[in-house]
Image (tube, grey):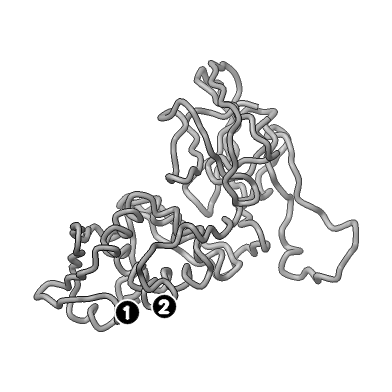
Amino acid sequence: MPIHEDMSIITPEGHKQLKSIKKVTRLLDGNGEFQDVLATYIDDYYGYFYEFCFKAIPFTLKCTPDHLVYRIKNVDFLETRDPKDIRTNLEKPGFEKASAISIYEYMAVPFLQEIPEMLPLNLPIDKDNFWFLVGAILNRVAIDKMPKIEANRITLQLFQDEMRLIKFPDEINKIPTVNGTVLLNPNLSSYMATLIENPLVLLHLPLRYQSAIFNGFFFDPARPASTLDDRLMFVVWYIYCRMNKKLANIIYTKNKEYQLNVSSNPTPCSDTHIWIRIKDIRVSVERTRVFLFKTEQPTVVINNFIIKPQ
């Protein structure tokens, strides 16, 4: 079941577009964990593709008609389901060929598993205000006020009223300046440089830390952050969904910015997945390269959605 080369995968190093790589060694599976890829096959393909479009996020999934995609027809039962309800007539999610899936059905984005090894060393990681600060620094990145990161310091541009809104942990040495503040911590500088390169690593943190990052990212309610960086907005969107078990929307504005929008009647998430409704299906014929993977686990995540690779 080949995968279109325009699709992206989640690797330990972040999102990677398939056309930019020749071999995949590790890949996210449907349980939100990284697995080894036993073999990567690349081939030329000419034929039909089904492209699924969604209202909630400005990303699509493109695959061949016989591709098996994890989906469910209706998620209304998720809000009212009683854990003790053992009725067998409740619809269960499962894999279906792309050509048999209809609009208004739902596809699944998995919640990622916690990976303790992703935690930084020699920083006050057990304090909520540290992760709040991480979110505030990412806010500066999002609104194009990129902090200056050096070997032993980070320089942030902050207005005076913003300075009062950010909670700085006592272990972070700071020097207020006219246009912001300077943070004198080499370990923090190194960690933030890593996050800016690959913000997806935040999605493997415990929920408590993710919640503090989310609050730090939106530390100023008078100026909610928009961003040109789709990776950052994906992280913020994911954290909101995981915190609230409700689906938020990513809006792509006319100014080509990404914004987070919370619907008044959001779709519920399950304990393990974010369910996203299909709003359109485009069918095309293309000549392109396609990728196939051999893995030990039966599912993989392509363009954030769960499919079967073989």
Amino acid identity at mark 2: Lys
Find residue 11 and report its horizontal and vertical position in percent.
49, 43
Q: Secondary structure at mark 2?
A: loop
Find residue 91 and report its horizontal and vertical position in percent.
82, 54
Taking the spot 41% from the left edge, 69% from the top edge, the residue there is 213
Whether residues under marks 2 and 1 lie with C-beta atoms below 8 angstroms apart, the answer is yes
Q: Is residue 285 above or below residue 236?
A: above
Residue highlighted by disc 1: 169
Q: Is residue 129 above or below residue 64?
A: below
Taking the spot 16% from the left edge, 72% from the top edge, the residue there is 180
Residue highlighted by disc 2: 127
Residue 118 in view (yes/no): yes
Question: Which quadrant, please, contains the N terminus?
Answer: top right
Find the distance from the CA under tag 2 to the CA under tag 1: 8 Å
Question: Which quadrant, please, contains the C terminus?
Answer: top right
Binning the other alpha carbons within 10 Å of mark 1 as few (below 14), some (14 to 19) or many (20 upward) gives: some
Q: Quadrant of residue 165?
A: bottom left
Amino acid identity at mark 1: Pro
Find residue 106 and report its horizontal and vertical position in percent.
66, 50
Taking the spot 59% from the left edge, 47% from the top edge, the residue there is 279
Q: Secondary structure at mark 1?
A: loop
Q: Is residue 229 above or below residue 173?
A: above
Binning the other alpha carbons within 10 Å of mark 2 as few (below 14), some (14 to 19) or many (20 upward) gives: few
Find residue 17 and report its horizontal and vertical position in percent.
44, 35
Q: Is residue 238 above or below residue 98?
A: below
**Count of number-bearing discs:** 2
User: Which of the pair 6/80 is nearer the observer?
Assistant: 6
Q: Is residue 85 left or right of residue 146?
A: right
Q: Quadrant of residue 157?
A: bottom left
User: Which of the pair 151/305 is nearer the observer?
Assistant: 151
